[in-house]
Image: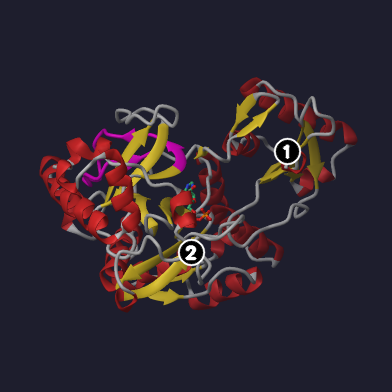
Amino acid sequence: MIYWSPSECMDPEARLGYQSELLRKQVKYAYENVPMYKKKFDEKGLKPEDIKGLEDLKHVPFTVKDDFRENYPFGIFAVPMDRIVRFHASSGTTGKPVVVGYTENDLEMWAECMARTLAAGGVTKDDIVQVTYGYGLFTGGFGAHGGSQKIGSATIPMSSGNTKKQVMIMQDFGATALCCTPSYCLQIIETAASMGIDPKTLPVKKCFLGAEPWTEAMRKEIESRFDVKAYNIFGLTEVLGPGVSFDCKYQNGMHINEDFFYPEIIDPNTLEPLPDGEIGELVFTALTKEGVPVLRYRTKDITSIIKEPCPCGRTGRRMDRILGRSDDMLIIRGVNVFPNQIEEILINIEGVEPTYQIIIDRENSVSDNFEIMVEVSENVLTDEIKAMENLKNRILSEIHSVIGLHPKIRLVEPFTIERSAGKARRVIDKRELYTR
Ligand code: ADP
Ligand code: ZN
């Protein structure tokens, strides 16, 4: 089967009409059922009827993460509790988490989105799908589970952690598909190797990786070490969870489930919509959600929309890889740096393992200490000091040529950097301590 649903290939013109109609209804629904939206519209002197279609979307006020926090826990819910059948929440490292509630229809739509995601990578009911995203309030586990169940594949609800057991079950149950974060996928590969198992001999053939930024270089690394196809999948709690967009076999940008989510790219400074192809902040309007409607949600994720048609035949516009979150962008000695830029460089250097951590500190009030901790391969460790020095200098010069800064490079043994079963912690920014 190539597509999960015919609506993935809907005529683009017809889709615009369909989206306009859904938008009209959704704006009215949000206005009438969520006081926060009513307030935002009233303050602008805007009536739901003013939004006649997509052409008027630009007038709709934005929604941001703080709106969720200020309305914690259920203030943005549009239905009474008897219609809510599930809660989820985003990790929210600081402050209150973002809480969302789903109706029966929302869960059905979510499963549909995730079924499309898995099917696009070739999952059928013959597959055995190991779900290694965390189950719980985090959307990853249950999200992937819903899609796998809808397809009718045999689902292994592993949740995250206990990596040796993950490898054992994978081998013993014959898992053919794996869903987890890219950094955890790498950890599974490393762990298998440390157990004396060649990762390439494991039965997994397709991986559905997301929930954190990663690079093309990382994709190639995972694909070759694991002998799999690694598909990028994207989503966020406020909008749905995983399943908002997904790679097809061409792996050339993630198709957005446009019949449910209308994307925009805005200039994060002027807040004006940008044309397809330009880089900016991704904004989503959920067109059908009942539990927690979201209008023009600012994701803080930086990317662009690819409008060229994809050879696979799906007509949902594609979004490019996430360059980073605007709040993950580091400003080091006045230079803007995304962790992904560092990843891309490191992975392409021979002798370096794909696990790294960026540490920024400020000893005096003038300049930032910028250090990159890099794990080196076992064979490099046994080399002479001279070879280690050369490697260090090579890393330094490549980083300097791309970002123009001279970080301190600390080469460490494999497994020195703490691993995470979920989202990797790539940056430790100690400067916050001084600004508080
Ligand atoms: P939290 O905000 O606590 O991290 P979520 O699980 O909702 O909680 O995270 C959603 C975010 O994860 C997205 O906004 C995006 O920044 C990131 N993300 C999800 N999938 C991808 C992906 N495929 N590539 C890059 N970043 C991703
Ligand atoms: Zn495609």
Up-down: is 337 above or below 430?
Answer: above
Image disc number at residue 194: none
Apparent side of residue 198 relative to residue 231 in the rendered image (left or right): right
- The kind of residue on which mark 1 rests is Thr
Binning the other alpha carbons within 10 Å of mark 1 as few (below 14), some (14 to 19) or many (20 upward) gives few
Instruction: Work out how far the residue at label 2 is from the one at label 1, CA to CA, in angstroms.
Output: 29 Å
Residue depicted at 24% across the width and 45% down the height:
316
Residue 322 position in % (x across, y down): 46, 40
- What's the residue at 52%, 44% (across, down)? 220
- The answer to whether residue 152 is visible is no
Which residue is located at x 32 percent, y 38 percent?
264
Quadrant (top left/top right/bottom left/bottom right) for the C terminus: top right
* Region of the chain picked out in magenta, as a range: 300-319
Q: Is residue 283 above or below residue 238?
A: above
Whether the magenta-drawn stretch holds residue 133 is answered as no
Q: Are marks 2 and 1 in contact (CB under 8 Å)?
A: no
Sequence-earlier tag: 2 or 1: 2
Q: Is residue 24 visible?
A: yes
The kind of secondary structure element at disc 2 is: strand
Q: Quadrant of residue 104?
A: bottom left
The residue that appears at 49% across and 37% down in the rendered structure is 323
- Residue under circle 1? 435
Q: Position of residue 123 (x, y in %)?
A: 34, 63
Nearer-the-camera pick, 96 or 184 = 96
Report if the beta carbon of the residue with label 2 is closer than 8 angstroms to ligand 1. no
Helix, strand, or loop for circle 1?
helix
Label 2 crowding class (10 Å Cα cut-off): few <14, some 14-19, many 20+? some
Quarter of the picture containing the N terminus is bottom left
Give residue 89's mark: 2
